[in-house]
Amino acid sequence: MMRFLFVALFSLISISSVFSQSSEPQRMSSVELEIRRLDLAEARAFKEKDKRLIEQFFAKNSVVNNPRNSLTFGSVGVVAATRLGASDYFSFDRNIESVQIYAKTAIVMGDETVVLKNETGGAGVTVRRRYTNIWMKTGKMWQIVARHANVICP
């Protein structure tokens, strides 16, 4: 009986130490830190309508499943949508929830809150959405090759 209690107690201690180790915050790799920085800079470029930066962030052959329920193709298409006012914001806040790194590919997921500036889109309206950006190392730089953003219904 005593041996059984000892084994059971030892098992509980072992299990709890595994759980406590897994709940400790992990140190971020330099690649993850770089991706997080780039992902936030990409949001800032949209808020500031910096077409040069937007074009650099998106690969020429990228595709965006945009929150207007259509596809936008390539960095040229993303910049054109910006010129037409599809991405005209008073504010743009992005919350990164997850970054997964797989060799030369990084997947970033989170949520965004934008306040629209465009009169045709409802100036002053706050829009919350979920997003996924897929970054790929192309040569010496990271670029978005695919993006999905959808509006969260209130």
Image (spheres, rainbow, N blue to C red):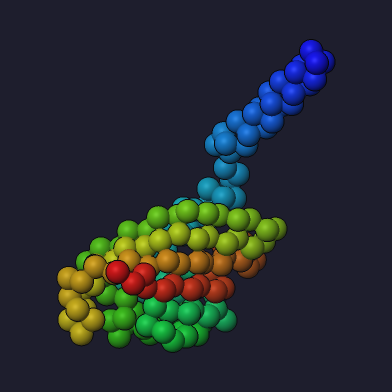
Q: Quadrant of the N terminus?
A: top right
Q: Would residue 122 appear left or right of 153 to someone viewing this image?
A: left
Q: Would residue 81 appear left or right of 5 to someone viewing this image?
A: left
Where 136 falls versus 80 (above or below)? above
Residue 81 at x, y = what percent? 36, 83
Which residue is nearer to you in this view: 15 or 118?
A: 15
Which residue is nearer to you in this view: 31 or 93?
A: 93
Q: Would residue 8 appear left or right of 121 to someone viewing this image?
A: right
Q: Kindly indicate the quadrant of the structure image that contains residue 153.
A: bottom left
* Residue with the most extreme top position: 2
Which residue is nearer to you in this view: 4 or 74?
A: 4
Query: Residue at position x 32%, y 59% from top?
Result: 93
Which residue is nearer to you in this view: 54 or 96?
A: 96
Residue 56 at x, y = what percent? 48, 70
Asked whether the viewer can see residue 100, the reply is: yes
Q: How many marks?
A: 0
Residue 116 at x, y = what percent? 23, 72
Q: Would residue 80 appear left or right of 120 to someone viewing this image?
A: right
Residue 124 at x, y = what percent? 17, 70
